[in-house]
Amino acid sequence: MVRKFFIFVTITLLFLSLNSNAHCQYNITIKSKFFSFNLSYPYDWHCESEYGLPKNIQAVLSPQTFLMDSSPATIFVRIVPRTAQTSSLKKFINNDFLNVKKRRPKIQYGTDFILTTKDHKDAQIKTYFEEPQGLYDAIAYIAEKKAFVIIILQTTSQKAYLRALPTFRNIVMSYQCNLPQDKAPPPLPKQIHKKPKKKKTKRKTIRQKKQTSFTC
């Protein structure tokens, strides 16, 4: 019963307020060696994407009213390259959950659904919770050609989780890849075929001297 209620509240909040904070958002460009992309986040959140972050994390977002280390809700952005073992998004999600399960054996699956990003990609959303620790997570997976983008919401209570869900949802839907992932070869310069100029040949007129006959 508790799980059904949790799923219901999660889906309801994620689909509320389509235009919330639309007029008061910051934009950030996150760059990697594979590609770069844009995200939008509300004015009352702080984003760190340059200094003091681990190598496998490209950005960290948290409410401005809390210090990042003690925030009850934190959003992490990661870029993970594709490998032979994770060639598809389904395989990658399964491997990712198995790795999390090893560190947090009591974590339980909540629900999943799809959000559409700004550049019309499908973001696979997975939700998890862990009792009695009171930890609630929502993870968005976005597949690109050379890597996977992961946007992770981690919270330390159900109250913080429900408050942060609309922000998480808007951040995921604002995702937009803004650089081509496969650099196309530069177009070859058009070769202009010039018609060879015809050499003007001077026609030499040979004047034939008329033979004049002399009679002696």
Image (cartoon, grey):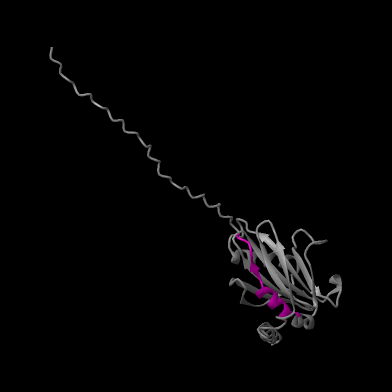
Image height check: is 85 above or below 168? Answer: above
Q: Quarter of the image for the N terminus: give it.
A: bottom right
Q: Nearer the viewer, residue 112 or 203?
A: 203
Residue 173 percent across, percent down from the top left: 65, 75
In this rendering, position of residue 161 left or right of residue 124? right
Q: Quadrant of residue 212?
A: top left
Image height check: is 116 above or below 191? Answer: below
In this rendering, position of residue 54 left or right of residue 196? right
Residue at image coords 71%, 73%:
40
Residue 157 percent across, percent down from the top left: 80, 80
Q: Quadrant of residue 150?
A: bottom right
Q: Nearer the viewer, residue 99 or 14?
A: 14
Residue 88 percent across, percent down from the top left: 58, 63
Residue 140 colored in magenta in the image: no
Image height check: is 84 above or below 173? Answer: above
Q: Nearer the viewer, residue 19 or 74?
A: 19
The range drawn in magenta is: 164-180
Residue 175 colored in magenta in the image: yes
In this rendering, position of residue 44 left or right of residue 174? right
Residue 147 percent across, percent down from the top left: 64, 60
In this rendering, position of residue 147 left or right of residue 154? left
Q: Quarter of the image for the C terminus: give it.
A: top left
